[in-house]
């Protein structure tokens, strides 16, 4: 896939999604530059996960989504998998599957039909497992892992895929604070080293503000605000759309959102 200078990694125009007769997204516009980290926030039911699924090609949205200048419906599934990798909140895992075999699924776009994985594929998988603090986990069954360990394995599969666009749906929801930081620092490091583009959803607003270049606030299926973390994480916007009592204080890497009890 060839792109010209200035071509965005993601371009979403007037995205509308109805599921089960309910309108989930009602005309969403979004542009993400190559190498940018954009985090989508919003209250439960705002449409965050639905937006990510549409960008990843998991929901039909004819004419609304382009990746690196190409309409997503024009990309064959195999080609799309080389461009975009998704870490869903609760991926479906085949029963009895080992960690190594699951992460190897990320190499599927590069393995010939009816072929086998190469030494390079295996090396890529082991490198990612090492970087995610999972050495020695290859033979373990996914079902035997803790929630945090599984979350890191799901991310490992996406990183092994070698895609240039990474979609992360609540990537740290099952992780303790130490592994949250490790995972997000690794993603940010890979982004800088390989010009990865990251679009994430997060509930932890302070963490979201520390890593995002820009943030998008979704509410009721529409974009309620877009801008830098300082522009989006304001007490007024969070009170209005989350119905939350918070205090926003400056932090070293972004605003820190502190819940406070109402009077």
Image (cartoon, helix red, strand yellow):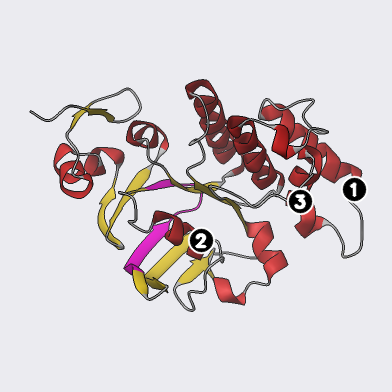
Q: How many marks?
A: 3
The region drawn magenta spans 24-40
Which of disc 3 and disc 1 is earlier in sequence?
A: 3
User: Which percent across, then down, holds residue 152?
Assistant: 62, 35
Which of disc 1 and disc 2 is earlier in sequence?
A: 2
What residue does disc 1 label?
118
Q: Closer to the camera: disc 2 or disc 1? A: 2
SS for dot 3: helix
Judging depth in this view, the residue of 245 and 8 nearest the camera is 245
Q: Is residue 257 above or below residue 203?
A: above
Q: Is label 1 in contact with label 3 (beta carbons under 8 Å)?
A: no
What residue does disc 3 label?
105
Q: Is residue 182 left or right of residue 19?
A: right
Res. 7 visible in picture: no
* 31 inside magenta stretch: yes
Q: Which mark is residue 53?
A: 2
Q: Is residue 142 above or below residue 12?
A: above
Residue drawn 61% across the image and 76% down it: 74
Residue drawn 45% across the image and 54% down it: 33
Residue drawn 56% across the image and 31% down it: 183
Q: Quadrant of the N terminus?
A: bottom right
């Amino acid at each position: 896939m060839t792109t010209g200078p200035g071509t965005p990694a993601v371009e979403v125009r007037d995205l509308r999604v109805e599921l089960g007769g309910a309108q989930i997204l009602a005309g969403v516009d979004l542009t993400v530059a190559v190498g940018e980290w954009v985090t989508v926030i919003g209250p439960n039911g705002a449409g965050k996960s639905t937006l990510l699924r549409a960008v990843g090609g998991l929901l039909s949205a004819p004419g609304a989504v382009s990746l690196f200048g190409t309409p997503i419906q024009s990309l064959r599934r195999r080609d799309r998998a080389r461009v975009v990798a998704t870490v869903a909140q609760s991926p479906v895992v085949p029963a009895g599957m080992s960690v190594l075999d699951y992460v190897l699924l990320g190499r599927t776009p590069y393995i010939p039909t009816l072929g086998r994985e190469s030494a390079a594929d295996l090396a890529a998988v082991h490198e990612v497992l090492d970087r995610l603090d999972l050495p020695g986990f290859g033979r373990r069954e996914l079902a035997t892992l803790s929630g945090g360990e599984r979350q890191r394995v799901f991310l490992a599969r996406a990183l092994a895929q070698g895609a240039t666009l990474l979609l992360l749906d609540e990537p740290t929801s099952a992780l303790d604070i130490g592994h949250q930081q490790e995972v997000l620092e690794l993603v940010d490091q890979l982004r800088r080293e390989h010009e990865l583009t990251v679009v994430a959803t997060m509930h932890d607003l302070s963490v979201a503000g520390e890593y995002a270049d820009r943030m998008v606030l979704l509410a009721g299926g529409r974009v309620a605000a877009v801008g830098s973390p300082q522009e989006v994480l304001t007490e007024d916007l969070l009170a209005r759309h989350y119905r939350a009592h918070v205090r926003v204080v400056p932090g070293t890497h972004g605003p820190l959102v502190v819940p406070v009890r109402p009077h």
